[in-house]
Structures are given as C-alpha cells and as structure tokens.
Image (spheres, grey):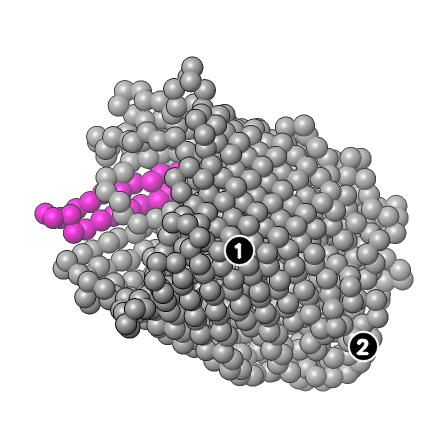
Amino acid sequence: MAHHTHLLRLRAPRHAARTAGTLAALLVATGALAQETQTITVTGRTLAPGTFVGFGDQAAARTPLQALTLEPELLHDQGITQLSGLTRLDASIGDAYNAEGYWSMLSIRGYTLDNRFNYRRDGLPINAETAIALDNKERIEVLEGTSGIQAGTSAPGGLVNLVVKRPAGTLREVRLEWREPGSLLVAADLGETLGTQGEFGLRINLAAEHLDPMVRNTRGRRTLGALAVDWKPAPATLLQFEIEDSHQRQPSVVGYSMLGDRLPSAASLDPRHNLNDQPWRQDVILAGTTASLRWQQRLTPDWRLVVHAMRQRLRSDDRTAFAYGVYDPATYECAQWCDRFAPDGTFTYWQFVSDGERRRSDALQALLSGRLSTGAVSHALEAGVLRSTYRGRFNDLIFDIAGTGNIYGTLDTPPAPGYPDANTDRDERSTEWFVRDAMQFGARWQLWAGLRHVSLERRSIRTRPDADGSLGASAYTHDATVPWLALAVQLAPKTMLYGSWGRGLEADVAPSLGRYANAGESLALQSRQLELGLKHGDEALEASLTLFDIDRGVAADLGSCDGPATCRHVADGSARHRGVEATWQGRAGRWGWQTSAMWLDARRRGSAQAGIDGSRPTNVPAATLRLGGAYHPAAVSDLALQAAWLAESNRVVLPYDQSVRIPGWSRLDLDARWRTRWAGTALTWRVGVDNVFDRRAWKESPYQFGHVYLYPLAPRTWRASVAARI
C-alpha cells in the first residue's frame, strides 16, 4: 500500500492460548512479589517534562511548548494496543489513513506525520513503517508543534517518542485482554534486580495476540519479545542495553470511496464488511528487530555525557486486494471514475504484492548536558551530534488488475496475471549538530534558544530499467540550519505565559520518472511556527491554552503528467494552519476530568494551481473535542467509572472540490476499572465498550495515492481485561 501511487502512475492510470499457558507458568515460577501501592488517578495523561524536547529536566509548567505524556494505565483503560488509538486521547492528534492490518498513520495540528522522520524511540529516530508494539513501552510522549528543534527533517505538526520500559526492581505481572468478536492478548512484564548492591537490572516483556477485529475475515496474530538490561559498574556510570523483536501478520482492510459524485451513506453500509475479502489476498507481514545501547556518564554533579546507539531492521511483505477506481483491464485507462468508485458501487480490483521489503535504520548520538551560571543568568545547556542512516531495499512488485468488485456484494475474482514492475531503492544519511540553552533571568523570566544544523544526503535508484533503459537514479545533498526561540514569564509559581518562534525543514525530490521534466531534482520545504501559550500545572489541576500559526511549504505536480516531460514536481505555495488548543485536567474529591479541544483554520495559499488558494486540506476537521470524566464511588473501594465523549466536525474529501465533505460525528465510550487483592495477588479488572450507541459515520476521508478513501467508525465493541501482579 505504501507504493500504490507510484505504481498507478506507471501503469496509467490456538497460538495465543499456548503462549498464555507459558506466561502463567513463568508467573508462578518466579515466586513472591513486591506489594503494589494503591493509587487513585484520573487518566494517566500529563504534560510532559522537558527531557524529550531538550533543555534539561524542566517541570511541565516551566516548559514553553506543548507536549504530553501518555501513561500505560490510560492505554490499558481504553484498550489501546496500537498507535492509531492515540487519536482518542487528545484533540490535536488525528487519523491520517488508519487501515486495519497496516501501520498507523497520525496527524498533529492537521499535518500528517512522516512515518520515516517524525517518530523517535528513547529520543533517537526510527522508521515507523511497521506495526509498533506498545507492550514494552513505559510511556508515549507527544510533542505538538514545530519539530525542527528536536528533528532535522520532519513534518511540522509534532513528534511521537516511544520510551522503552527499563528495569525497576522486582516485578511479576501478567495481563489478559479480550476484545469482541474474538481478539485475545496475553502479555507478561517481568523484572528483577541482581548483584550484591543491585547493580544489575533486568526487564522482560512478552506478548502474543490473536487478532480478530470487527471487520470480517481479518484474523491475524502478533508477537513481541523484549529484553532490557541495566548495569551500573560505578556510581557515576550507567550502561543500558535493550532489544525487541516483533511480528504481525494480518490482512489489511481497504477503505470505501465516493460513489460517482456522491458520498455513500455511512448508515446504510455495514462497517464490518471487508472489501479486501478475496481468496487470493494474502496477509500483510510486518516484522522488526530494534536494539540500542546507551552509556551515561556523570562527569560532575552538574554535567553528564550520554552516548546512545540504535539499530533497527524492518521486514515486510506488503500484499492486498486493492479497490481503486474503475479501470479498463486491457488499456489500464479509466473513462471517468479514476479516483473513486462508480455510482453503482462498482470498482476495479488490483492485486498488489511487494514481498521482501527491507528497511534498515541506524542512529548514533553523543549528548553533553549540564548547568552553569554567567553572572546573574543561569543556563541549562545541551549540545550534541546525531548521525543517522536509512537504507530501503525492495524487490520488483506486482500491481495488476484482477477484476471487478462491488461494495454491496462482491464475487470472487481470479488473481491478476502478475506482471512484475520496478520499485525504488533508497539511501539516506544525515548529520545533525545541535545546541540548546534555557536561560533563567531572576525568578520569573526565561529565554530559550536552540539551533540545529542538518547535512542531508539522499540517493535513489529503480530496481529495474525503464523502457528506455534508464534506472532513474537521483542523488542530492542539502544543508540547512533551523532555529527556535522562546520567551517565558512565570506569572505564578505554577503558571507560565510564553511565546515562541521556530523553523522546520522537510526535504522532497521529484520522482525519477519520465513524465517529470525535473526528475530527480531536490526540494527544500521550509516551515515556520509562531506560538503563544498559557500553562498551569499543580497536583490538582493541569491546564493550558495555546494559539499557534504554522506555515508549511507544499510540493505539487504542475502540468498534465500524461506523457514524457509533461509536468514538474515543484514547491507550490504553502499550507497555513492557525488554531487554538485547550486542555483541562484535574480532580476534585471523587471526581476527575480531562478535556482537550482544538479549533483549526487550515488553508492553502500561494499556489500556482487555479482554485487551490483558500481551500481546506482534505481529511482535516476544523474542530475536535475530547471529553473524559471519572468517578470513584465511596461504596466500592478502588472502583473507577470512566466516560469519554469524542466529537469531530466535518472533513473535506476532495482537494479540488470543497463542497464534498463527510459530516461531523460524535461517539461515547464507557470504561470501568476495579482494583482488588486475592491470595497475595493484586488484580486490576477492566471492562469497556466503545461507541456505546453504535453510531454509524465516516471517521476519516484520506485522499491517498490519488484516490478518495472513506473509513467508517468501528461499530459498538466490548472489551475486558485482567492484570495480575503478585
């Protein structure tokens, strides 16, 4: 699915049960466990400290940007096992083509995150073109806003950082989770401290899941094994190693589309129906191994050196029966309905097979951080260098017409003839030098300054020659420096007003295809952000109000693109997103609440294409609301009753016609959590139901691969889990 746009332009248009027994045996064999501390929490969603975004360890109320931390308890309460589930937790995080059985795609502040550049793991860049397991993650940190200060090249909406679980003493926990109609997850979290003085620590995470989602005939399975080791050879030295291996296989689910010039009624279609249900379709396989080694050395009480290396190896077989437009199988041409289905629900089935995809990412960072004073000004300094590489190797692929389908009832079609076509191999190297300084002037004023210099090299070559013998090879280098500044004043000990300005960078390149007159030409797309924010944080209340203005360069194809050298891939104006974010979370007595809202005015400007300026981008709602509440009744100890209301306004469907929009929607989710003890074991029981009223609506409308897609809200879904810690 990741390469469909490339191909269309070329063509023309009982395992889980066994694992559960093993994990239970592990739990029993490990013996007695530490006592669990009982706490009452609202959600597990908090504003993040400054460790992720740099500038040293800063309290949330004293950090001049918007970042949040999502704790495991919140994810477990709402049954979230995939990154796509984060859209339920914060108004600024949205769907951006989230298909069952494929990797997650998110947006922040209306900008789609780049899965190759906007994701971090313990602060180092990783490739998110895979199914990322959350079972061994301590928390998820989300930076909202300009990402240039933290990443050299990335989309400006923000960053997602996955923090791996580290050894934390003796721990024995097993969790069993069920979701209708038949998904079953069993996971174990085991930890131990070793050595005469506790200088060694171990953490093991194991998980196996039988996947059986609400969409019919999409059963699959996934597994995870992870190990983390800490060793403290000296009081000022810490060595940390960790490795994880994950595997998922499951059919992917293709979206619906427009029916000619109209939107189909979401109420009239069964969200459980699977358009990908052909006998020849195969599972999408997403597997990966990631390992890291980190050395932390305390140089003085105020200064620390950290050297961190990471290696990621991803393996995937990308396969699907793909519903795309209405095309003639003899000519691969479409007469009218190229980016949607026919009015009667008919579409063309394409067989897509890209086996043996291999992606390799490596990163090495050296970071020096500490504190010093110059006169009356104190400094929290960070300086370092990051070297990262990416290598993508792909085999020839198949993307061919297999037959015709219909959304109201599809006959089985034979597989496509399967003519091999070329793919594109890619190599990227980046060196980033950065320095950040948080300056304190007296008790109230802070000035934050950061600078990041990026040297980027990219090369690509097709896996087989074109008809003219060309391999479409391209190579380019780019150097850029991105700054970030913020001024903050502490209005009260827990309240801060700040303003910030920053720039970001994205690199693009014209595809190495004959229809482009500038094939292989590199593009540097810059972004700029202004932000004004008010933040408050104490033990009872966390709140923020943020105004932002982001302007991002956009690349587009100009010309007919219907023959050799008939179009150019160039910078074409910008996408400007201006908005307001508000969060409010707290508790009073036995009540707790969490509110998140975003209003967004997203518009194109400066485009050379007629009718584009002033238009809204596709698949971006103008208003988003997340309301959550919790109640702890006095009559039942350690019981929490929770409710969440999610609402979004309409979304534009077509990039060239603002009149076509999917309606806004809302839904109610309910959860309950009960903690108790039995025979020395701490038990946490959870039960929940998503989409209580079984609301039927189109959840999102991504315009991807030159085609309209519509994904429905999942129907009412029950889930339950129990976690045992002895």
Q: Is residue 210 left or right of residue 440?
A: right
Q: Which of 167/94 is in front?
A: 94
Percent position of residue 6, x then y: 69, 68
The residue shown at (30%, 49%) is 166
**Label 2 vs label 1, nearer the camera:** 1
Along the line of sight, which residue is nearer the eye, 662 or 57?
57
The amino acid pointed to by label 1 is Gly
Dominant SS in magenta: strand
Whole-number angstrom distance, CA of label 2 to CA of label 1 = 42 Å
Determine the image quadrant of residue 520: bottom right
Where disc 1 sits, the SS reads strand
Q: Which residues are magenta?
A: 187-209
Residue at screen point 15% across, 47% down: 198
Local crowd size for mark 1, using a 10 Å CA cut-off: few (<14), some (14–19), many (≥20): many
Considering the image in quadrants, where does the C terminus appear?
A: top left
Q: Quadrant of residue 515?
A: bottom right
Q: Is residue 494 visible?
A: yes
Residue placed furthest toward the left: 196
Tag 2: amino acid:
Gly
Q: Is residue 365 left or right of residue 569?
A: left
Magenta segment includes 257: no
Instruction: Give the x, y percent position of residue 706.
Output: 75, 62
Q: Quadrant of the N terminus?
A: bottom right
Crowding near pointer 2: few (<14 within 10 Å), some, many (20+)?
some
**Which of the marked residues, 2 or 1, is nearer the chain's N terminus?**
1
**Which residue corresponds to mark 2?**
559
Q: Which x, y percent locates residue 376?
A: 30, 69
Can residue 690 be seen by looking at this rendering?
Answer: no
- Give me the residue at 77% from left, 46% from top: 662
Indicate which disc residue 217 carries. Answer: none
The residue labelled by disc 1 is 533
